Amino acid sequence: MKIGLFFGSFNPIHIGHLIIADIMQDQTDLEEVWFVVSPQNPMKSSKSLLHEFDRLRMVELATADNFRFKVLDVEFHMPKPSYTIDTLAVLSDKYPQHEFKLVVGSDNLTHFHKWKNSEQLLEYYGLYVYPRPGKMKTLDHPHIQFIDSPLIDISATFIRDTLRKGGSVRYLLHPHVSDYIRDKKLYY
């Protein structure tokens, strides 16, 4: 089975993430999309991150109604920060029957050369790239596939800031995620 791996902090997961994942499994040869919740991205600050178990739970809530989505906490059991190539090695050993592809936004291409073992990632796994706002670098490589999808400009930072100000994020989050945030008083 060909699986798309969608890595992220998901702080919080929002409708944009779900739309992208749905398009990837529906309009490509990916049979499923697995959300890999990253406790700490090596290229981002972790000071504004919610606890990893809260972020994992929100992804579980947001994806529970789609049988083609799966949620993984594999990086919770690995040294931090976690590197994509190391996670892929673990997943490839655990699931040798699957072929993995990375699902990334085009904004990641600007700094992709800085990722640990980026050439190996391209050669052995490949990228399925969805468009992100702004002028983005494109890479020409036989293992990079650009996917036609809507340009979605929803940011988790905007959502967190809006919540802190007491604003509405009603249509930006899955209702179960919104309920979870409200009930646990997260981001306030």
Image (cartoon, grey):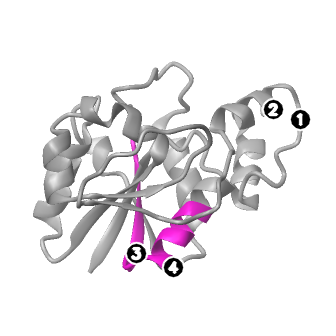
Spatial CA span between label 4 and label 2: 31 Å
Instruction: Tell me the SS state at disc 4.
Output: helix
Q: Residue at x 58, y 55 (%)?
A: 17
Which of these two is toward me, 176 or 123?
123
In terms of sequence position, does the residue under pointer 2 or pointer 3 come before the other?
3
Residue 32 is marked as: 3
Secondary structure under badge 1?
loop
User: Left or right of 7: which side holds 142?
Assistant: left
Q: Quadrant of the N terminus?
A: bottom left
Q: Which mark is residue 162?
A: 2
The amino acid pointed to by label 4 is Asp
Q: Are marks 1 and 4 in contact (CB under 8 Å)?
A: no
Q: Residue at x 53, y 44 (%)?
A: 10
Q: Residue at x 38, y 80 (%)?
A: 31
Return the x and y of residue 24 as percentages of the image width and height.
48, 69
Closer to the eye: label 1 or 4: 4
Give the mark nearest the N terminus, 3 or 1.
Answer: 3
Specify whether residue 128 is in view. Answer: yes
Q: Which residue is mark 4?
A: 26
Work out whether residue 41 or residue 128 is closer to the camera in this orientation and state it. Answer: 128
Question: Disc 1 versus disc 4: distance between alpha carbons?
Answer: 33 Å
Give the quarter of the image for residue 102: bottom left
What residue is pinned by disc 1? 167
Gap in angstroms between the C-alphas marked 2 and 3: 32 Å
Q: Is residue 177 left or right of residue 112?
A: right
Work out how far the residue at label 4 is from the one at label 3, CA to CA, in angstroms: 9 Å
Crowdedness near tag 4: few (<14), some (14–19) or many (≥20) residues, C-alpha within 10 Å: some
